[in-house]
Amino acid sequence: MANVAVIGSQWGDEGKGKIVDWLSSRADVVVRFQGGHNAGHTLVIDGVTYKLSLLPSGIVRKSKLSVIGNGVVVDPWALLEEIETVRGKGVEVNPDKLMIAENAHLILPVHQVLDGALEKIRGKGSIGTTKRGIGPAYEDKVARRGIRVCDLRHPEILKEKLEQMVAHHNALLKGLGADTVNVDEIYSRLMAVADEVLSYTGVVWKTLDEARRQGKKILFEGAQGMMLDIDHGTYPFVTSSNMHAGQAATGSGMGPDAVNYVLGITKAYTTRVGEGPFPTEQDNEVGIFLGERGHEFGTVTGRKRRCGWFDAVMVRQAVKIGGIHGIALTKLDVLDGLEELKICVGYELEGKSLDYFPSSQVEQERVQPVYETVSGWKESTRGARSWAELPAEAVKYVRHVEELIGAPVTLLSTSPERDDTILMHDPFLG
Ligand code: IMP
């Protein structure tokens, strides 16, 4: 049996929640390895909707271990609030079901203040962050001034570290003309939740190593998508972590061979929230149609998502860079009823053809998509559970996508319901 990493292949919001939930019913351990509560995963199980941000999707299932790895940045108050919310829906959460890496970094209120202040000074060049403090928390981690979960066990060191961190940031906030933060207030708020957070803390790398040796199936749950990756995305309009499946190992404390199959979640069209280049964006009636039909509003911020045609060049790039073995194609039903569909198969930049998405911010803004037009289908694909239930043109579309991106469709999702899924290959078989 193989361990599987699930990563987004576009700009996030590809419908990972449902696929991860579907796979987690077969896994023993579900691990988050990057990002934080900027993510938003919606699960619909037996008609009940769960909106998860920081908790791994395995949490809604009995007898699964959910792990928040060291690569995640944890807002302790958001974590406890989310635990209470899912408990309110009848989900059991206890230290036997949830483990947080003791070396994960914390997001503190100062990071959210900085996130807001930095976005403000970026002005027109703002990233459109979720304002959850994700970027500033990762900055502190790399700057070696971050506070980790294990620091909560040692109040004296915690206070010292906090004073240094806040002194650093208050100087910046003052310079920006923003309100400064009070270190004593943050310290006492932290101490008020420390014991509860620590009750979930464990040595994740050891637990995962044991799980692996016992032949347990591990599912690594990525958040966001490859085009938001700090190295490979549309920098600087990206988030501050790596979505790349290699991060599943680094962000959980396992060797690179721990991931045997990489499943790229891919939406049958393209969306993006926040600012930044988006070559196939349709700021017209097509975009409105996709947004309304696909309910394209952010799970975390409620922001309207920008919508456009499927960009095969970008997904192919995500497949190659991310080492994606197969994709789960989602939301095919949103395209039902469109007479014609467009697929981006290349770009043009200043009279030259490109078969890849360039790295420069300027070139990413300037590329013009080259489209291929294919026939749509009138019939509904919603809820289909086998190939035979799909209209011929829909099957053609899926086959063409496979050819263009250079990866097979492993799973096809035809509605938000978990069982409305067509399985071509079981990722746990490797
Ligand atoms: P941050 O992660 O809050 O720093 O935001 C940086 C960029 O990533 C912004 O464009 C956000 O809209 C985007 N982003 C962050 N998390 C998600 C997500 O889960 N889905 C889609 N976009 C996201």
Image (tube, helix red, strand yellow):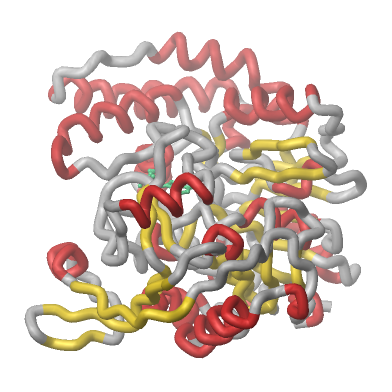
Which residue is painted at 65% across and 42% down in the image?
A: 102
Whether residue 407 is visible, yes or no, is no
Which residue is painted at 48% across and 40% down in the image?
A: 298
Q: Up-down: is 177 above or below 423? A: above
Considering depth in this image, is 362 or 420 the residue closer to the camera?
420
As drawn, is 363 to the left or to the right of 139? left
Q: Estimate the x, y position of residue 66 in percent, counting from the top left.
A: 76, 47
Seen from this angle, which residue lies furthest left?
Answer: 350
Corner quadrant of residue 201 = top right
Considering depth in this image, is 220 or 263 the residue closer to the camera?
263
As drawn, is 65 to the left or to the right of 274? right
**Figure label count:** 0
Q: Estimate the x, y position of residue 109 in percent, counting from the top left.
A: 43, 23
Corner quadrant of residue 314 = bottom left
Q: Estimate the x, y position of residue 31 in percent, counting from the top left.
A: 69, 54
Which residue is painted at 75% across and 66% down in the image?
A: 384
Q: Quadrant of the C terminus?
A: bottom right
Whether residue 22 is visible, yes or no, is yes
Corner quadrant of residue 24 = bottom right
Which residue is painted at 63% across and 67% down in the image?
A: 379
Q: Quadrant of the N terminus?
A: bottom right
Considering depth in this image, is 135 or 9 the residue closer to the camera?
9
Considering depth in this image, is 326 or 184 the residue closer to the camera?
326
Q: Estimate the x, y position of residue 409 in percent, counting from the top left.
A: 63, 79
Q: Up-down: is 225 above or below 52? A: below
As drawn, is 405 to the left or to the right of 238? right
